[in-house]
Amino acid sequence: MTTFCRDDRKKAISVYVYTYSMATKTISLTEEAYQRLREMKRDEESFTDVVLRVTGSDRDVMKGFGSWADTDLREAVEAAQEEFDEDFERRQDELFGR
């Protein structure tokens, strides 16, 4: 916005500065929870950044970590890996006459 002084020979420029600040909340954490959050914190990252990173993305591969803990998935994967390894060795023996 431009305004003119009384004698109209000088221009004065008015500058409006709009400052936006986000609201903050104080939360209580146990010492254990604070330590875990602090361990996840990267250099130059705020605690807010950590919380948003950990909770904000569906693409986060660690988001569901532990959700299969009470299943037999580990055993099934290990069995499939063992079967694959045995088959691989058998095929090597057939191909290379070991």
Image (spheres, rainbow, N blue to C red):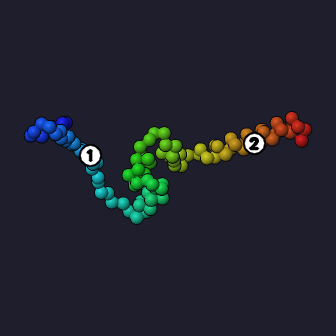
From the viewer's side, name the closer residue of 50 and 6. Answer: 6
Q: Is residue 83 left or right of residue 22?
A: right
Q: Residue at x 40, y 47 (%)?
A: 52
* The disc label shown at residue 20, or none: 1
Q: Residue at x 48, y 45 (%)?
A: 63
Total label count? 2
Mark earlier in primary sequence (1, 2):
1
Image coords of residue 81 (percent x, y): 70, 43
Image coords of residue 2 (percent x, y): 18, 36
Quarter of image, res 26: bottom left
* The disc label shown at residue 83, or none: none
Q: Residue at x 77, y 38 (%)?
A: 87
Image coords of residue 34 (percent x, y): 41, 61
Image coords of residue 53 (percent x, y): 44, 47
Q: Quick one: quadrant of the C terminus?
A: top right
Q: Residue furthest right?
A: 97
From the viewer's side, name the closer residue of 81 and 27. Answer: 27
Residue annotated with mark 2: 85
Q: Residue furthest top?
A: 95
Amino acid found under the numbered disc labelled 1? Tyr
Question: Helix or strand or loop: what does disc 1 sit on?
Answer: loop
Q: Residue at x 78, y 39 (%)?
A: 88
Whether the residues at callouts 1 and 2 have beta carbons within 8 Å, the answer is: no
Q: Is residue 4 visible?
A: no
Question: Helix or strand or loop: what does disc 2 sit on?
Answer: helix
Q: Is residue 94 left or right of residue 57?
A: right
Amino acid found under the numbered disc labelled 2? Asp
Between marks 1 and 2, how big is the CA–CA gap? Answer: 60 Å
Q: Is residue 86 left or right of residue 55?
A: right
Q: Residue furthest bottom?
A: 31
Determine crowd level at label 1: few under 14, some 14-19, many 20+ residues with C-alpha closer than 10 A.
few
